[in-house]
């Protein structure tokens, strides 16, 4: 198969292998650290978890991606990227150790969150640097395959890291600090592997005599660029419609995630270990839905069109969320986790496709920056809203019906848009 052949060629490239190893170790550490943070907030015996605490944890995990993400390139265009991987991962290893110490000594929550926020903020620079470095280790004709392999492998590494964290947390009692130290060890290994790359290999390449705007000017240009991206997006109605729908579906998914966490913690288990095991199964079911979406989405987009498939995903969720969620029992919720994983990821793949095909290349990066902000802010916003609506045991009929109504409204609005495209411009 051509894909297998291309992968074999890539893996023969020493610098690509080293860069991929940096990514795998770094993202595995991210998976461990994020699960450690979530389980400490939700499943620690000494803490009385509330939806507000969960919302705070999600803000720590996701807001750096939204606030710092668009501006990361301003500094990455000035710093040697190999050094970003080295010092960034060393810094994260150190900060993760500090977080572990804070867990042991039971400091006030704001100090713990400040430490955790520092770790996730540095992560944004590392991930952006990995993407920017790839053209320096593969040829132009190999870039598409490399772009497909690297992020996918990184996601799998993060998932594996999260699974390892769950395992350590279940096997070792009161092990939140130990899990954080495991993440620190992975960060350290990623830093050490980066030493196998030459300092100047990954750029940035500055031609002689080239000048760059100051950091302040760079920030201003970034804000201006995102504004221009929004204006261009508004002129591309199909892409704007898909992105709006994806933002709403991400909001719904976030609200249901907080509900699931509270149910696992207080309704379905008598102790933290059992609750954590149930959460692990639910996360696995959602991950299976993500994988299923990757398999079926190309085929269904070919038949329904991109907006048609997003509509189908949202409509399916609108029907199944109340049908399965109002039981507030684990079995139906496990099925719901799979279905929502499939629907959310299927819609995201279709939205990515719409933006890539409908947005002019000159604006595509700026629109994806807007997309990244909306994607994460919607999830954090959902957690904040849920914290105001959910009782301690996570059983809220109002929230379930409200989420179903949002899914239904999204499907109805999209179906009207889809009919406008029928017989006209192809949605594919």
Image: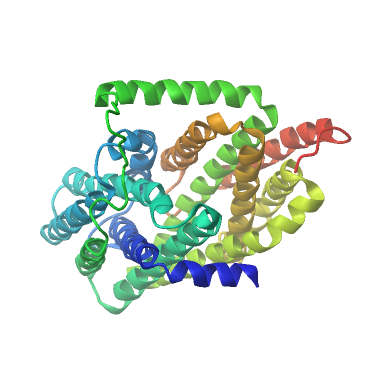
The x, y position of residue 330, in whole percent, is: 54, 66
Whether residue 321 is visible: yes
Does residue 374 sit above or below 268 in this rendering? Answer: above
Residue located 39% across and 37% down the image: 66
Residue located 46% across and 60% down the image: 150
Residue 165 sits in quarter: bottom left
Q: Nearer the viewer, residue 50 or 205?
A: 205
Residue located 69% across and 36% down the image: 409
The x, y position of residue 252, in whole percent, is: 56, 44
The x, y position of residue 105, in whole percent, is: 10, 58
Specify the quadrant that holds the C terminus: top right
Specify the quadrant that holds the N terminus: bottom right
- The color scheme shown is rainbow
Residue 86 sits in quarter: bottom left
The x, y position of residue 5, in whole percent, is: 58, 72
Q: Nearer the viewer, residue 283 or 136?
A: 136
Q: On the picture, is 11 further left or further right than 319? A: left
Residue located 49% across and 59% down the image: 146
């Amino acid at each position: 198969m051509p894909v297998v052949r291309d992968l074999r060629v890539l893996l023969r490239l020493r610098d690509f292998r080293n860069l991929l190893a940096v990514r795998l170790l770094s993202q595995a550490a991210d998976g461990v650290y994020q699960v450690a943070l979530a389980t400490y907030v939700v499943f620690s015996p000494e803490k009385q978890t509330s939806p507000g605490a969960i919302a705070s944890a999600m803000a720590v995990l996701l807001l750096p991606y939204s606030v710092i993400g668009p501006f990361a390139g301003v500094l990455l265009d000035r710093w040697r990227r190999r050094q970003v991987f080295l010092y960034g991962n060393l810094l994260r290893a150190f900060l993760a150790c500090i977080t572990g110490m804070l867990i042991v000594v039971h400091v006030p929550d704001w100090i713990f969150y400040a430490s955790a926020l520092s770790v996730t903020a540095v992560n944004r620079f590392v991930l952006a640097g990995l993407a920017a470095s790839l053209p320096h280790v593969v040829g132009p004709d190999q870039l598409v395959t490399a772009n497909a392999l690297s992020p996918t492998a990184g996601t799998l590494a993060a998932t594996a890291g999260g699974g390892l964290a769950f395992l350590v947390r279940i096997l070792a009692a009161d092990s939140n600090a130990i899990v954080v130290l495991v993440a620190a060890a992975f960060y350290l290994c990623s830093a050490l592997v980066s030493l196998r790359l030459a300092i100047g290999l990954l750029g940035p390449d500055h031609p002689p005599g080239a000048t760059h705007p100051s950091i302040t000017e760079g920030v201003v240009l970034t804000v201006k660029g995102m504004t221009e991206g929004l204006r261009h997006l508004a002129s591309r109605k199909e892409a704007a419609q898909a992105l709006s729908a994806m933002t709403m579906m991400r909001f719904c998914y976030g609200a249901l995630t907080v509900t699931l966490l509270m149910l696992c913690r207080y309704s379905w288990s008598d102790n933290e270990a059992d609750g954590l095991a149930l959460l692990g199964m639910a996360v696995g079911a959602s991950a299976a839905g993500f994988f299923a979406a990757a398999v079926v989405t190309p085929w269904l987009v070919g038949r329904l069109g991109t907006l048609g498939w997003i509509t189908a995903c949202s409509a399916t969720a609108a029907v199944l969320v109340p049908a399965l969620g109002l039981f507030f029992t684990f079995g139906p919720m496990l099925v719901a986790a799979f279905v929502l994983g499939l629907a959310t990821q299927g819609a995201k793949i279709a939205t990515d496709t719409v933006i890539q095909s409908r947005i002019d290349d000159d604006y595509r990066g700026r629109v994806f920056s807007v997309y990244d902000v909306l994607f994460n802010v919607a999830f954090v916003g959902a957690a904040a809203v849920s914290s105001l609506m959910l009782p301690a045991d996570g059983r809220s009929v109002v929230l379930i019906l409200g989420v179903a109504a949002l899914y239904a409204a999204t499907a109805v609005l999209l179906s009207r848009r889809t009919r406008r495209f029928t017989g006209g411009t192809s949605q594919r």
